[in-house]
Amino acid sequence: MRGGAAIAEKFHGTRYRSRIASLLKSISPALDNLDQMLPPAQLLSAAVEANVRWTIRVVLESREGKARAVRGDVKLVGAIYDLVTGRVRLLQ
């Protein structure tokens, strides 16, 4: 499983040090509503999507992000890149 550090920390108590820990701390709120009973591959996929959506929300709720969005200077679009297939899936 690739990219499962956030899931391992959130649901299995794995602890990381230094910069990884601070990155995982910022991602953790995105994972609050995930179904821990999902099979590992589905849980990882759901976590990736939740992280993308969370990041967009955080940026748009920031003072600068909100101001730029209101002025029309920026539009955020969430997307997920599949490392295996090379395809990009845009989120609605």
Image (spheres, rainbow, N blue to C red):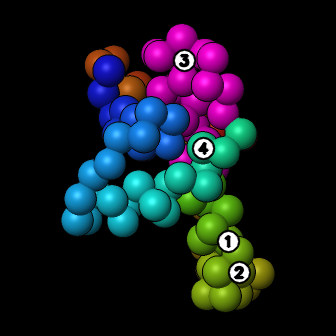
Task: Assess whether mark 4 and mark 2 are in contact (beta carbons under 8 angstroms).
Answer: no
What amino acid type should be assigned to the residue bearing mark 1? Leu
Spatial separation of the CA atoms under disc 2 and disc 4: 23 Å
Looking at this rendering, what residue extends furthest in the right direction? Answer: 70
Going from N to C along the chain, the mark reached first, 1 or 3, is 3
What amino acid type should be assigned to the residue bearing mark 4? Leu
In-front residue for pair 52/10: 10
Q: Position of residue 84 (x, y in %)?
A: 29, 19
| Secondary element at tag 2 | helix
* Residue occupying the point 30% across, 27% down: 2
Q: In the figure, is residue 87 to the left or right of 48?
A: left
Q: Which quarter of the figure is the C terminus placed in?
A: top right
Q: Quadrant of residue 55?
A: bottom right
- Disc 2: CA contacts within 10 A as few (<14), some (14-19) or many (>=20): some
- Residue matched to label 4: 31
- Residue matched to label 3: 42
The magenta region covers 34-53
Going from N to C along the chain, the mark reached first, 4 or 1, is 4
Q: Quadrant of residue 65?
A: bottom right
* Residue occupying the point 35% across, 41% down: 14
What amino acid type should be assigned to the residue bearing mark 3? Gln
- Residue matched to label 2: 66
**Vertical placement of 7 versus 41: above or below?**
below
